[in-house]
Amino acid sequence: MAVVVLAAALVGLLVYGVATHGTDTSLDAAVKKGQRPPAPGKTVSLPSLDGNTRESLARLRGKVVVLNFWASWCGPCENEAPLLESAQKQLARTGAGTVLGVTYKDDPVDSRGFVKRYKITYPSVNDGKLQLAPKFGTDQLPETFVIDPRGRVVALSRGEVDAGFLNSAIAQAQGAA
């Protein structure tokens, strides 16, 4: 009898652990319902890949931000890099905002190589200590969150983005101002 009770308790703890430590999908649910939840982690300040500056979502408030979590070892991240660079050029041309790349579990040397290889001009920061990614529920790559000028998430993609998603999400974020 004691073995059965102990086994049931262990199974209960396992279920609880899996349920409470999975991907945080609260942003996903809110955005799917048409809500615009505040972007988490606005006060987190991360170092640029060159280590000379720092960036935060709070500093970018008032602009559209296409927040993209990526890594140099991520194949889909390579596929979407040209689209994100195109979005950066569009946002920079109009002064409406920026793409902000955030590396995830990536060596800074490899990240800088990726930036050079794909001629990325948008700012990228190093989240080596995972200070920002978990706040967005990010645990797979790539993941992209489009944030309006008021600091609210208007669209997200947990996977590789395409031009249709980016164009629609950026237009939505610009219209939400």
Image (cartoon, helix red, strand yellow):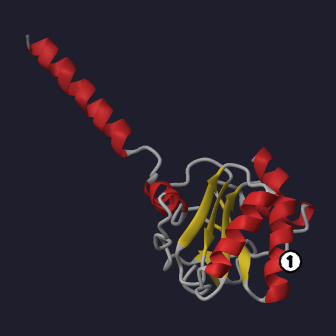
Q: Is residue 73 visible?
A: no
Residue at point 62% right, 85% down? 60
Quadrant location of residue 128? bottom right
Q: Position of residue 151 (x, y in %)?
A: 53, 79
Quadrant location of residue 84? bottom right
Q: Is residue 6 above or below residue 77?
A: above
Which residue is at the far left?
1
Q: Position of residue 2 (x, y in %)?
A: 9, 14
Residue at point 73% right, 85% down? 96
Residue at point 71% right, 74% down? 171
Q: Is residue 49 left or right of residue 22?
A: right
Secondary structure of residue under mark 1 = helix
Q: Is residue 171 above or below residue 107?
A: below
Q: Is residue 5 left or right of residue 171?
A: left
Q: Position of residue 73 (x, y in %)?
A: 76, 47
Which residue is at the far top?
1
Quarter of the image with the N terminus is: top left
Quarter of the image with the C terminus is: bottom right
The residue wearing badge 1 is 89
User: Neighbour class for label 1 at 10 Å: few (<14), some, many (≥20)?
Assistant: some
Q: Position of residue 150 (x, y in %)?
A: 54, 84
Q: Is residue 125 left or right of residue 9?
A: right
Residue at point 74% right, 64% down? 166
- Amino acid carrying label 1: it is Lys
| Pick the front one: 24 or 131 | 24
Q: Is residue 97 visible?
A: yes
| Pick the front one: 112 or 161 | 161
How many discs appear?
1
